[in-house]
Amino acid sequence: MQMAEGDLDRFDRAILSILAVEGRISVTNLAGRIGLSKSPTQTRLKRLEQDGVITGYRAMIDPVRVKREHVAFVEVKLTDTREAALSAFNVAVQAVPEVEQCHMIAGAFDYLLKVRTSDMVSYRAVLGEKISSLPHVAQTSTYVAMEAVKDVAL
């Protein structure tokens, strides 16, 4: 049986809060920070992983150092919003590595994409060759980020 959000107690929430910032912290240090011994902390951590609350661990990469500092948000309107068209778009957008996030939106457009490239020239190529070629794309509007004021991953 999977854990519901209401099933998380203060120790579970503390574990998640610390791991969100320090994913490589040792279990011993984590235990000390939340006020439990190592064994119950390890048990809680394993349960959070098994229940799908913790879905994985990853490295946080500096986009400037890997030449991916240009961020654009793209509104996408589709020509067709029936389930088959949405599904085709959803599958195809997964194959575009420059699309960091894709959200279906309830509003004046259908999808909002976060696209990360090295510069405007690269972005224009991605927009023209990849995003505009995705199934059922009718129109796009681009908003270029000037600065990330807050960028937190869960």
Image: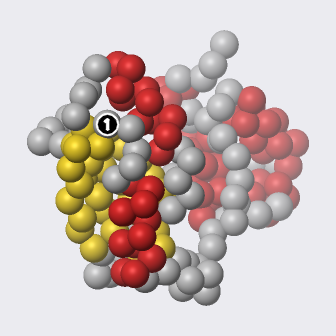
Residue type of the residue flagged with mark 1 = His
Residue 113, x across and y down, in percent: 36, 53
Residue that numbered label 1 is attached to: 136
Quadrant of the image occupied by residue 122: bottom left
Residue 108, x across and y down, in percent: 12, 42
Tell me, yes or no, if residue 116 can be seen here.
Answer: yes
In the shown orientation, is residue 142 left or right of residue 119?
left
Q: Give whichever of 39, 141 is nearer the camera.
A: 141
Residue drawn 85% across the image and 49% down it: 38
Quadrant of the image occupied by residue 20: bottom right
Residue situated furthest left in the rendering: 108
Q: Give whichever of 73, 87 is nearer the camera.
A: 87
Which quarter of the figure is the N terminus placed in?
top right
Residue drawn 65% across the image and 50% down it: 15
Quadrant of the image occupied by residue 67: bottom right
SS category of the residue bearing label 1:
loop
The mark total stands at: 1
Residue drawn 23% across the image and 54% down it: 140
In the shown orientation, is residue 151 left or right of residue 37?
left
Residue 87, x across and y down, in percent: 43, 27
Q: Give whichever of 43, 108 is nearer the camera.
A: 108
Mark 1 surroundings: few (<14), some (14-19) or many (≥20) residues within 10 A = some
Residue drawn 56% across the image and 58% down it: 97
Q: Looking at the picture, does residue 81 appear above or below residue 93? A: above
Residue situated furthest bottom in the rendering: 65
Residue 2, x across and y down, in percent: 63, 19
Tell me, yes or no, if residue 152 can be seen here.
Answer: no
